[in-house]
Amino acid sequence: MTSAAGSPNGPGQEDTTPAAHAAHVEKTLLQARELIESTVSLYRRRPDQSPPAPHTDVTALGEAVEQLVVGARHSVCIAITGTGAFEQIAREALTAMPVGTVVRVLCAPGVADCALAKLAHAPGARYEIRVSEADLRDIVISDGAAALVRAASGNAKGQATLVNDRAAVRALELLFAGAWSLGRKLDDHLALSPRLLGELTRIILERLRSGSTDEAAARDLNMSLRTYRRHVAEIMRELGASSRFQAGVRAVELGLLFD
């Protein structure tokens, strides 16, 4: 992160505020997008090179994921965006990770459960699991050298492609890292009440962060002032916050808000 004379941490010191962190993450994601786009352009200028073969069959997809996992020596990154064939394949692969491998799992809220939480205490690999609501694709990245990416929503169902180009894999790593930095720890996610994961909570937290008065926020949400303040008090209690400012900080830490 860059520092400035006006930084809240003082001249010459690194700005570690949530806003500065978010700006750094956004910059990283934009750089990753540019890298992906440049890689795609490079491939388009090389028509003589055959594109990687897609894997649409569940068996072939499972074999491809297994090959990446078994061959890993240092690290494996996996993003699971929903339920289905890839989720089952990824869960099976997670139980067979090489000893000593650092495994980072990023999953959508609908996939997060206690079964994944048990992996953190499993012997062998070192598991780190976070939950993210970011718009990701199903991904497996092995040692930063090879990856498997599922097709974006709307494309052929179940289609996935093996990627061996170092620049393309690096871009995927950057995208994963950006989403990872904003994700909440699985244990924190499982401890959250359904209220905190609701849309109304997110809207109220946004109003608190923007500095809206209770009267204005209640009017915008078409509820009485008393009802709005009751919601705020309940949210603060769920977050274990003693002030509205602390509630905002805690919400960012848990990935309920992106600053």
Image: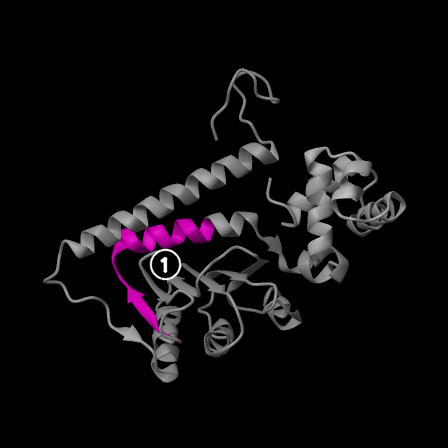
Determine crowd level at label 1: few under 14, some 14-19, many 20+ residues with C-alpha closer than 10 A: some
x, y percentage for residue 244?
A: 78, 38
Helix, strand or loop at label 1? It is loop
- Looking at the picture, how far across and down is residue 250, in whole percent? 71, 44
Secondary structure predominantly adopted by residues drawn in magenta = helix
Q: Name the residue under label 1.
A: 143
Above or below, 4 against 207 in this view is above
Residue lying at 62% horizontally and 53% vertically, measured from the top left: 184
Q: Which residue lies furthest to the left in this view?
A: 48
Q: Is residue 251 one of those drawn in magenta?
A: no
Q: In this view, does 50 lie to the left or right of 244?
A: left
| Residue at the image position 59 percent from the left and 18 percent from the top | 10
Stretch of the chain drawn in magenta = 158-177
Name the image quarter holding residue 243: top right
* Tag 1: amino acid: Asp
Q: Residue lying furthest right in this view?
A: 226
